Image: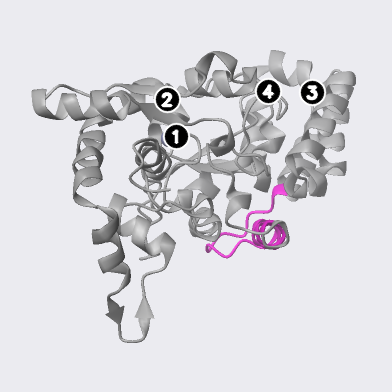
């Protein structure tokens, strides 16, 4: 739902990527584990020449696996497909586990480097659903991680991508569990590290204002719809069903109730009186005023800062509470 590139420049993302690469080459978590050394050992111990060729190829492409952007990773996956390497990895569970072990993701996941990666991406809400927090706790020495890391390209199919920067997505537990182990390309599935966000395609709406007002009097629950749902792209529709977006949001009709109350409280005159308040020499900007009114962020580049920001903003606009 959220593109990280709405709030982080590509250059900065590439810098984080390089930092991630340096950190896993020279780990600073008290262990001196080196992925490439482990791969060299695995190549030496290979049971067949074919297995050895695959591991040598992984070593050859190692830098690219860690540093490449999603579109480039897919080219590498295709290359491994053409060579038949992915099939061998898929069929030989023991071999697959050995590659995964060499990449040592489990150790990384429990360490401070994973925490730093998530801190750098600065996501406070899940990029797949925007319905739950992916808070990153402070580094206290005992790492309590309140987020999960999703592998956009499943590590069960591509263990050699288990440490790839652009394949590590901080998410909520629900979305991480919802996501299957199938290979989805960026052409068919939203990748949070690609500058294309679902916020453009998916708009939440509710009952029209007259009905909403009537519901308020009768104390009836509000309905949540997705605008023009029938004409959405296949990719957007797939995201909605894969991540259970409608089911996730169905229970939030009490937020709509509050927004309808606000629609009648925040008259244009009242809004103007709020703009006229000075905090020393500062007055509320349009974005700040809207944030005050809907109790959430309303600017597209701020969607990542709090759960339900997209939903709350869409409904507030639909009701005419904000512009
Ligand atoms: Zn989520």
Residue 245, disc: 2
Disc 1 C-beta below 8 A from ligand 1:
yes
What are the residue bounds of the magenta stretch? 13-35
The residue to which callout 4 is attached is 188
The residue depicted at 20 percent of the width and 30 percent of the height is: 213
Q: Quarter containing ligand 1?
A: top left
Image spot of residue 285 (x, y percent): 42, 68
Q: Secondary structure at mark 2?
A: helix
Let me know if residue 32 is in the magenta part. yes
The residue to which callout 3 is attached is 47
The residue depicted at 75 percent of the width and 44 percent of the height is: 69
Q: Is residue 33 left or right of residue 303?
A: right
Asked whether the beta carbons under mark 2 and mark 1 sit within 8 Å of each other, the answer is yes
Looking at the rendering, which quadrant does residue 255 occupy?
Answer: top left
Disc 4 C-beta below 8 A from ligand 1:
no
Q: Is residue 13 left or right of residue 247?
A: right
The CA distance from mark 3 to mark 4 is 37 Å
Task: For label 1, count other residues whose C-alpha is less than 10 Å away and answer few (under 14), some (14-19) or many (20+).
Answer: many
Q: Is residue 188 left or right of residue 124?
A: right
Q: Is residue 316 left or right of residue 53?
A: left
Asked whether the beta carbons under mark 1 and mark 4 sit within 8 Å of each other, the answer is no
Looking at the rendering, which quadrant does residue 16 occupy?
Answer: bottom right
Task: For label 3, count other residues whose C-alpha is less than 10 Å away and answer few (under 14), some (14-19) or many (20+).
Answer: few
């Amino acid at each position: 739902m959220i593109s990280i590139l709405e709030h982080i420049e590509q250059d900065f993302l590439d810098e984080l990527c390089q930092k991630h690469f340096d950190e896993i080459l020279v780990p600073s978590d008290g262990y001196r584990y080196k992925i490439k050394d482990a791969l060299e050992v695995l190549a030496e111990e290979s049971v067949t020449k074919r297995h050895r060729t695959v591991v040598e190829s992984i070593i050859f492409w190692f830098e690219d696996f860690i540093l490449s952007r999603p579109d480039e990773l897919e080219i590498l996956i295709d290359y491994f497909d053409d060579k038949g390497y992915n099939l061998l990895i898929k069929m030989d569970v023991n071999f697959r586990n050995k590659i995964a072990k060499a990449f040592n993701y489990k150790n990384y996941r429990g360490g401070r480097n994973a925490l730093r990666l998530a801190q750098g991406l600065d996501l406070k809400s899940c990029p797949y659903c925007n319905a739950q927090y992916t808070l990153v706790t402070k580094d206290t020495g005992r790492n309590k991680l309140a987020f999960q890391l999703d592998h956009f390209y499943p590590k069960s199919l591509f263990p050699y991508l288990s440490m790839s920067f652009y394949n590590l997505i901080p998410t909520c537990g629900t979305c991480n569990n919802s996501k299957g182990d199938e290979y989805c390309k960026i052409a068919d599935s939203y990748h949070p590290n690609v500058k294309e966000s679902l916020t453009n395609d998916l708009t939440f709406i509710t009952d029209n204002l007259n009905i909403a007002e009537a519901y308020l009097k009768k104390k009836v629950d509000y309905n949540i719809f997705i605008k023009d749902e029938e004409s959405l792209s296949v990719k957007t529709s797939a995201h909605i069903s894969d991540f259970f977006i409608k089911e996730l949001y169905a229970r939030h009709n009490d937020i709509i109730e509050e927004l309808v109350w606000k629609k009648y409280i925040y008259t244009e005159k009242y809004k103007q009186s709020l703009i006229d308040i000075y905090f020393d020499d500062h007055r509320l900007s349009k974005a700040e005023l809207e944030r005050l009114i809907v109790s959430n962020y309303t600017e597209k580049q701020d969607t990542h800062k709090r759960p339900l920001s997209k939903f709350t903003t869409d409904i507030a606009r639909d009701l005419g509470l904000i512009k």
